[in-house]
Image (cartoon, rainbow, N blue to C red):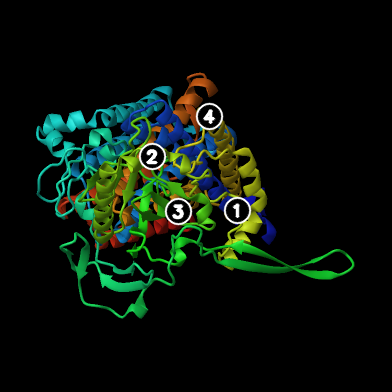
Amino acid sequence: MGEEDGEQVTAPPIVWVGLTFMAAVSFWCQATVTEERFVPALNVIATEYNIPDDVAGATLMAAGASSPELFSSIVALFITHSALGLGTIVGSEIFNQLIICAGAVYAARAGKLKLDKAILAREVGFYALSIVLLLCALQDKRPVEGDTEDHIFISFFEASYLFGGYILYVLVCANFDAIVAFFDPTYKERQSSLVAPTGNVEPGYGAFETTESQSKKISVDFSGMPFLHETYDHEPEDNFKDAAPSMTTLSRTPTGEARKEHVSTEGQLVVTDDGVKTQQMAAVDSDSSSIKKSLTRREGEHLLADSPIHGTYSDGASVREFRFIVNTEKPSDHHGLYDIEKSDFEETVSCFLWQRSLFYDKARFAVHGWHKRWFTFGHEKVTSVPDRSNFEKHAMTYPRFVDIEVDDARLIVRIINPDKNKRSYYFLAPNREIFETVVHKCEEIIQVRLKSVEIVGRDESDIPEGDADYEPSLIEFPAGAGFFAILVHCILFPLKLSMHITMPDVRHLDSKGNSTSSLNYAFLAIFSCLVWLIIGSYAMVTSLEHLAALMDIPDAVIGVTVSAAGTSLPNYIASKIAAEKGFGNMAVSNAFGSNTFNIMVGLGLPWLMYTSFGTGFEPYSGLRNEGIMESVIILGLVLLVFIITMFFSGFELHTWHGHLYVLLYAAYLAYVIADVYL
C-alpha cells in the first residue's frame, strides 16, 4: 500500500477487479486490432503499391506488429506523462528475447532450431546497436525542482540518432542480398535455385511428361515468388524436419467402400508399376485411427453435424422452451492433421494443407499467416474448405493450373495461376508423406489437362458464387466451444460488436480466392484501427498506472512486467505457431527485429515528435530514473549470454536453451520485484 498525505491509499475489491479486467480487455483489444485488422490492411496497401517485401516487412508490417508497444509509448508520453511506455518497451525486449526464443524452440518440429547466420547477424547486430544508442540517450540524469528523484533528459539530437538507426536498418534490409553477396560471392548462386533430389531439370516448373519418377528435380526461382525470398531461402531445411507422426490413409474403392490404413511416416515410399505410391510399413490396429468418420465429396452429399441449443424465454405470462440448430462441424472433427483420404472411384486425394494467406504475405510471420484448409485434388477441379464451422459455405476453387513449383526441402508447393495477372497459391504440407502425395497428384492432374484441351481451356463460370473467407466474423457465436470460451464471448460481445461495426475487415475472398477489398477500404480500416489502438492503449496505460499507484510501485516497474508481457503475448503465440510449421529461424530472428523496432521507433519516434512539437526542441525531462538504466544494462547482458550460447552450440537452439532463457526471465522478474519491496 502506498501513502498519500500520511494516509493509506486503499480501494474496495471492486476497483481492483475493475482495473484488472480493464487491463486484460485492453490487451485483448490491442492484439485483435493489430493481428486481425491493422496488419491485413497494411498488407493490402503494401501489395497495391508494390512495396518490396523486405522494405514492407521492416516498415509497414513491423509497425503493425509492434503497434501495441508503439502506441503505449505515445499515450504514456503525450497523454499520461509517465514512464510506463518506456518500461513496457524495455520489458518487451527482455520478454521477446527470452520467452519468445524459448517458446520457439519448445515448439520446433525436431526439438531444436537451426539459425541462419546471416539473418541472425543482421538482427542481433542492429538490436545491439539499438541498446547502445538507448544507453547513450539515457545518460543525461539531473534533479528537477519539486521531485527528489532524478529525471532523465532526452534531447532532440538523441531522439534523432535513435530513430535514424532504424532508417539504416531499413536500408540494410532492402539491400541485404547485395551486402551478403559482397562478402560471399557464392551466395546468389546458392539462393537463386533450390532443388529437390537428383534428376533432370524439366522446363515449365512441373509440366511433367510422366509420373514414373519420384525424384524429379524441380528448380525454384525465388526471385519471382513474393515473400518466399526472405522467409524460405534463409530458413534452414532442418527446421522443417520432425519426428514422424502417426497417420491414417483412407482409400475408397471403385464401389465406394472405405479402406483405412494406419501408418507411420517413417516408412519407405515406393512406386508401383501403375505409378501409385504405397507405403511399406507394419500395419497398426485401425481402431487407433484418428479418423472419426469420413468427409465425402460426392456432389450434393454433405455431412453436417447440426447441434441443437436449448433454452427458455418468457413472454411475461408463461415460460416456454425454444430450440435452434447451430452447425458446429468442421473438417478437423473428422480428420487428423496427417490423414489422407483417397477415392479410387472419384480419383481424388484429400488432405490438410496450410495455405499462405493473401493478407499476411508481406509480414515476416503472423498468427493467421497460414490457415489450415481441407483440400480435395481431382482431375476436374481442385477445391478446399477452411477448418471452421459452416465450412462448405466458404469453399475455394483453384484455377485450372498446368504448372507447379515445389521446394522439396521445405515441403512447399506453389500452384501457378495460368492468368499471369493473378496471384498464385502457396501450400505447406504437414509432413513429407502428404507433400509427396500432393505433388504426385498435381503431376497427374497436369498430365490429364495437357492432354485434354477441353479441360484446360474450359471457362470457369461454373465456379459457384460466394466467399472463401477462412476467418469467422468477430461477432460470430463460438458454437461448439467450451463453457469458458462462450462466457468470454458473451461478456465481450458489446465490445466485439462495436469493433465489428467500426473497423472494416479487409480479409474477404471470393470463391476463386481473390481479394474483394479495395484500396480505399484498406485506408478506412487503417484509420479506424489507429483510433482503436489509441483507445486500447489509453485503457491499458491508465488502468496499469492506477494499479501501480494502489500497489505503491513505480510505473516503469509495472511496465517492464505486466504491460510488457501483455503486449508481447501475441508475438509469442505467432512465434510458437511459426516454429510448429518449420519457420523457427524467422520466429527467433523476428523477435530481435521487433526489439530493434521497439527501441528505435517505439521510443525514438515519440521522443523525436515530443522534442520537436511538445518542447520546442528543448530536452524532454518527464522520465523519472526508476531503475530503467539497470533494465537496459540487463538487456545487454542477456543479449551477450545469447550470443555466447549461440557460438558454442553452432548457431542451434536446443531445448536446454529454452530452459535457460525461462530461468533467466524468472530471475529478472524476481530482481525487479525484490528491488521494489526489499
Kindly identify which residue carries mark 2: 458
Q: Earlier in the sequence, mark 1 or mark 4?
A: 1
Disc 3 versus disc 2: distance between alpha carbons? 23 Å
Residue 253 sits above or below residue 152 on the image: below
Residue 586 sits above or below residue 613 on the image: below
**Callout 4 amino acid:** Phe
Q: In this rendering, which labeled residue sits more in front, label 1 or label 3? A: 3
**Callout 2 amino acid:** Arg
Q: Which mark is residue 476?
A: 1
View extreme (right): residue:
317
**Callout 3 amino acid:** Val
Residue 639 on image: x %, y %: 28, 47
* Disc 1 and disc 4 in contact, CB within 8 angstroms: no
Q: Earlier in the sequence, mark 1 or mark 2?
A: 2
Kindly identify which residue carries mark 3: 385
Residue 253 on image: x %, y %: 33, 69
* Disc 3 and disc 4 in contact, CB within 8 angstroms: no
Q: In this rendering, which labeled residue sits more in front, label 3 or label 2? A: 2
Disc 4 versus disc 2: distance between alpha carbons? 37 Å
Disc 1 versus disc 4: distance between alpha carbons? 25 Å
* Left or right of 233, for residue 457: right
* Disc 1 and disc 3 in contact, CB within 8 angstroms: no
Q: Is residue 526 visible?
A: yes
